[in-house]
Amino acid sequence: DLVTGSTADEEQSDVAAVKFGDSRPPLSDRLSDPLEDATVGSKQPVTKRHRKLLLKSSFVSSSAPAGEEEQQLLEQKQKLARTQESRRRLLSDVCAKYRPSVTEQLVSQRQVSRVYVEDRSRLLYCEVPKAGCSNWKRVMMVLGGSASSTRDIPHDVAHYANHLRRLESYDHAGIAERLRSYNKVLFVREPFERLVSAFRDKFESPNSYYHPVFGRPIISRYRVNATSTALRTGAGVTFREFVQYLLDVRRPVGMDIHWEPVSQLCNPCLLRYNFIGKFERLEEEANFLLQSIGAPRNLTFPDFKDRNPLAERTSSTITQKYFSQLNSTERQKAYDFYYMDYLMFNYPKPFKDLH
């Protein structure tokens, strides 16, 4: 069975927050002592309605005294700050144990190729596909002044005409200065869920790129007695065939950012992100970040899904359905493939039989 544990990051931490831009104190200095979060592994379901209530300054009933309302808002911010502190501490500990040499490296342009820059807000954002990246690009376009509202930005514009610079486009001095003084933001997602979401998006809907470029070689390599139509179009790749490709050390076509592990895609041990958000709490945590960096009050994180809007969003239940098509050995190998992501970002093992 799929194990659905909390994605909260609740271990205590005494690590100081990484400083924000030169003109702003670190987040931990702008909030009083954070509340202790829940214990690791606890299950704290937060409904969509509850999240929205927490985000609004009026989430306390209008009959509540103003002082009580302010106190609850402060406590909510303190709890989110504590969560950030513990995530940074955990990531630092994992990096020290498993990637000790990485932290001493000089940063190359290739290693920041997925990082977008918004200079006005002093923000760096590493793009993790299937973890809210389209809406994050919309937010950065509004912050940068190239759009007035996130709702006015179509999906293709957000990705292909966003006028956002990548960190790799700066010289080494420009890269180093921004890494030193800007907010470095990363949003992650439960790895198996992200994988299933990518598969559904790229292989279960018509796609003029992924079907011929990935589908054809996958079907050719892993399907016995493939039809000429399947070999020609690349359509109809099964989830099991897709996972076979993913786990093949001699895979017939290269890696893709939509399913590349975040531990490789965003180089977290090297870049030392000071805000690590989770897709499972996307709106709440993204809006907390926007408030923390002094974004315009009317700019909130979009809550719409513009790719295949009628399709049900990939959930733990849907993920379980897809992974039930694999045997236990294949599931174990898939877990091993994403092991560092599970470790770095404190996601519980998704199946009980994994080790």
Image (cartoon, helix red, strand yellow):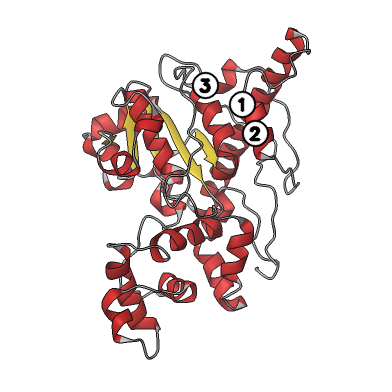
* Element under disc 2: helix
Q: Mark number for residue 51?
A: 2
Mark 3 crowd level (few <14, some 14–19, many ≥20, 10 Å Cα) = some
Q: Are dots 1 and 2 in contact, CB under 8 Å?
A: yes
The image position of residue 206, as x and y in percent, is 35, 63
Q: Earlier in the sequence, mark 1 or mark 3?
A: 1
**Residue 246 visible in image:** yes
Badge 1: residue crowd in 10 Å (few <14, some 14–19, many ≥20): some
User: Measuring 37% from the left and 36% from the top, which residue is drawn there?
Assistant: 137
Q: Which residue is mark 1?
A: 55
Q: Position of residue 37 (x, y in %)?
A: 72, 34
Question: Which residue occupies 57% across, 76% down?
Answer: 326
Vertical placement of residue 30 versus 169, above or below: above
Image coordinates for residue 205, horizontal then vertical, percent: 40, 62
Q: What residue type is disc 2 on?
A: Arg
In the image, residue 3 sits, relative to residue 83, either above or below, namely below
Q: Earlier in the sequence, mark 2 or mark 3?
A: 2
Foreground residue, 177 or 352? 352
Q: Amino acid at mark 1?
A: Leu
